[in-house]
C-alpha cells in the first residue's frame, strides 16, 4: 500500500487499475511509458470526488513477483495518476496493490479474488461496505468486493468509467 490521505468520507468507489483507469495491454503494464490513462477517467473520478466519494485503487500486480518490473515502476505510475488528479483539484485517497502471483508464492489473501485489500480499505477509512462500490473488469474484482460485503460492478476492459452511474 502507498501513502493514504487523511480525508474523511462515508462512501467510496474502489477501482481496479488496469483496464479500468488505464489501458490494459493484455499482459502487464510494466512502466510509466506504457501507462495510458483511459479517456474520461480523470473527469469521472473528479465528478465522484466532488460528490463526496472516497477514491481507492485496488490492483493485483503479480508482475512484481515475476520480476517483470519493480515496485518503483508501480509507484511511478501511481504518482503520475495522482499528479493528473491533483492538476484537476482532487486526489485518489489510497492505492493498494498485491505483489504476489499464485504461480510463485501460492495463494495469498490479498490477491484478488481475495478480499483483504478491500477489507483494509474499509478499515482504514472506517467505511461501511454497503456505502461502497468496486468497479473492475474481471470476475475476480467483483468476487473481491463481494467477499468484503461491497457491491461489485464489472465493466468491459478499456471502455471507460464514464458509463458507470453511481
Image: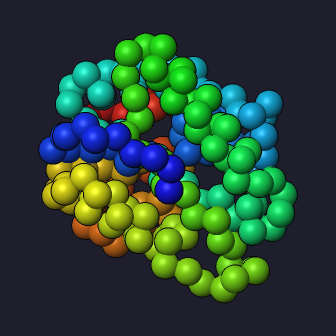
Residue 3 locus on image (x, y percent): 45, 47
Answer yes or no: is residue 157 visible.
no
Q: Which residue lies at the image location 54% right of the left edge and 40% below the top edge?
A: 20
Answer yes or no: is residue 67 visible.
yes
- Furthest toward the right, the residue is 68
Screen quadrant of the C terminus: top left
- Furthest toward the top, the residue is 88
Total labels: the figure holds 0
Question: Is 157 positioned to the left or the right of 88 in the image?
Answer: right
Residue 32 locus on image (x, y percent): 74, 34
Residue 35 position by quadrant: top right
Q: Which residue lies at the image location 56% right of the left edge and 45% below the top edge?
A: 17
| Scheme of colours in the image | rainbow
Above or below, 22 against 144 in this view is above
| Of 40 and 163, the residue lying toward us | 40
Question: Is 17 positioned to the left or the right of 127 in the image?
Answer: right
Question: Is 11 positioned to the left or the right of 69 in the image?
Answer: left
Residue 13 position by quadrant: top left
Above or below, 59 against 113 in this view is above
Q: Which residue lies at the image location 37% right of the left edge and 34% below the top edge?
A: 164
Residue 151 locus on image (x, y percent): 28, 56
| Of 86 and 63, the residue lying toward us | 86
Q: Which residue lies at the image location 69% right of the left edge and 73% below the top edge?
A: 101
- Furthest toward the bottom, the residue is 106
Residue 55 position by quadrant: top left
Residue 86 locus on image (x, y percent): 45, 20
Amino acid at each position: 500500500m502507498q501513502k493514504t490521505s487523511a480525508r474523511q468520507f462515508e462512501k467510496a468507489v474502489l477501482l481496479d487499475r488496469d483496464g479500468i483507469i488505464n489501458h490494459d495491454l493484455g499482459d502487464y503494464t510494466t512502466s510509466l511509458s506504457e501507462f495510458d490513462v483511459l479517456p474520461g477517467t480523470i473527469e469521472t473520478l473528479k465528478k465522484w470526488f466532488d460528490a463526496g466519494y472516497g477514491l481507492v485503487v485496488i490492483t493485483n500486480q503479480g508482475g512484481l513477483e515475476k520480476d517483470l518490473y519493480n515496485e518503483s515502476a508501480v509507484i511511478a505510475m501511481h504518482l503520475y495518476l495522482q499528479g493528473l488528479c491533483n492538476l484537476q483539484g482532487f486526489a485518489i485517497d489510497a492505492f493498494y496493490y498485491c505483489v504476489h502471483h499464485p504461480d510463485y508464492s501460492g495463494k495469498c489473501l490479498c490477491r484478488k479474488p481475495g478480499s483483504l485489500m478491500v477489507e483494509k480499505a474499509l478499515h482504514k477509512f472506517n467505511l461501511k461496505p454497503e456505502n461502497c462500490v468496486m468497479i473492475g473488469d474481471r470476475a475476480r474484482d467483483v468476487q473481491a468486493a463481494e467477499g468484503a460485503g461491497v457491491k461489485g460492478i464489472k465493466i468491459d476492459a478499456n471502455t471507460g468509467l464514464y458509463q458507470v452511474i453511481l
